[in-house]
Amino acid sequence: MQVFIAKDAAAAAAIAADIVENVVRSTPRPRIGMATGSTMVGVYRSLVDRHQAGALSFAESSVYLLDEYVGLDPGHPQAFRNVIRTDLADHVDLSNDAVFGPDGRAPDLEAEARRYDQLVTEARIDIQLLGIGGNGHIAFNEPGTPFDAPSSVVALREETRRDNARFFGSIDHIPRQAITQGIGTILQAREILLVALGPHKARPICDALEGPVSVDTPASAIQLHPEVSVVLDAEAASLLSAARPES
Ligand code: F6R
């Protein structure tokens, strides 16, 4: 595992974008697993800047979402498919039909989770971007989720709904369920890139990187993967005990 500690969020976003750019440039038809959430906004902005400067093309890339809320209207701005469009796809040469995600309005949600799991497994993701929840979740795999659980329909914990209330104006508007890639599905990616910013991520990052591999901290599963980069700002890195130089 390679851990990069940047002085601030902007520097962290640039390092993460460098890692993604490297995969996009060196892979014939790159398949990129994308997370949503505030952490990724700067990373995607940096990728858009590179594209607009003529330095990076996504024409050959396809994107696979980590997760999706259940029940949101297709046009809802917080539906993750729309978030990826607004933050990235609309500004780069990535075609709309190259963005894949679970359908949170499918009539049979469990069947939809199975369909998406198979799609992601067959695609074999080249690089999977991950954020981390305040409770250590990755995607919407909350503490206690077995690492070998496939993609599934999950209930969101109250703390996750509270954390994400900022995107919806009020906790009352946040869906109670999501379809999420399973941890086992995520671990199939060839490479994983976890990004965390801010002091509220210091505890889950310390648990994930230095604690035992445990379902209590879903993100600790990345210790089981051979190709992991973790990009942190100084605040998110503040509880790590191992001495690591700033990048
Ligand atoms: C989003 C996702 C979540 C977020 C995590 C961190 O697709 O799967 O696991 O990555 O909740 O969210 P932010 O970046 O908003 O702190």
Image: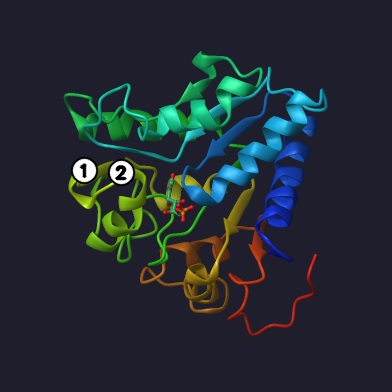
Tell me the quadrant of the picture where the N terminus can be found: bottom right
Q: Amino acid at mark 2?
A: Phe
User: Percent position (x, y) of residue 156?
Assistant: 25, 53
Query: Residue 110's image quarter?
Result: top left
Q: What residue does disc 1 label?
A: 173
User: Percent position (x, y) of residue 53?
Assistant: 81, 26
Residue 4 appears in the picture as rendered: no
Residue at 61% x, 50% y is 192
Residue at 17% x, 48% y is 172
Label 2, secondary structure: give it.
helix
Residue at 22% x, 25% y is 106
Above-or-below relation of 75 to 140: above
Query: Mark 2 or mark 1: which comes first in sequence?
Result: 2
Residue 214 appears in the picture as rendered: yes
Asked if residue 196 lies left or right of residue 118, the reply is: right
Residue 168 - label: 2
Q: Amino acid at mark 1?
A: His
Q: CA distance from mark 2 to mark 1?
A: 6 Å
User: Percent position (x, y) of residue 61?
Assistant: 64, 24
Asked if residue 40 lies left or right of residue 247, the reply is: left
Task: Count neighbours of disc 1 (C-alpha within 10 A) and say few if under 14, some if 14 to 19, many if 20 or more.
Answer: few
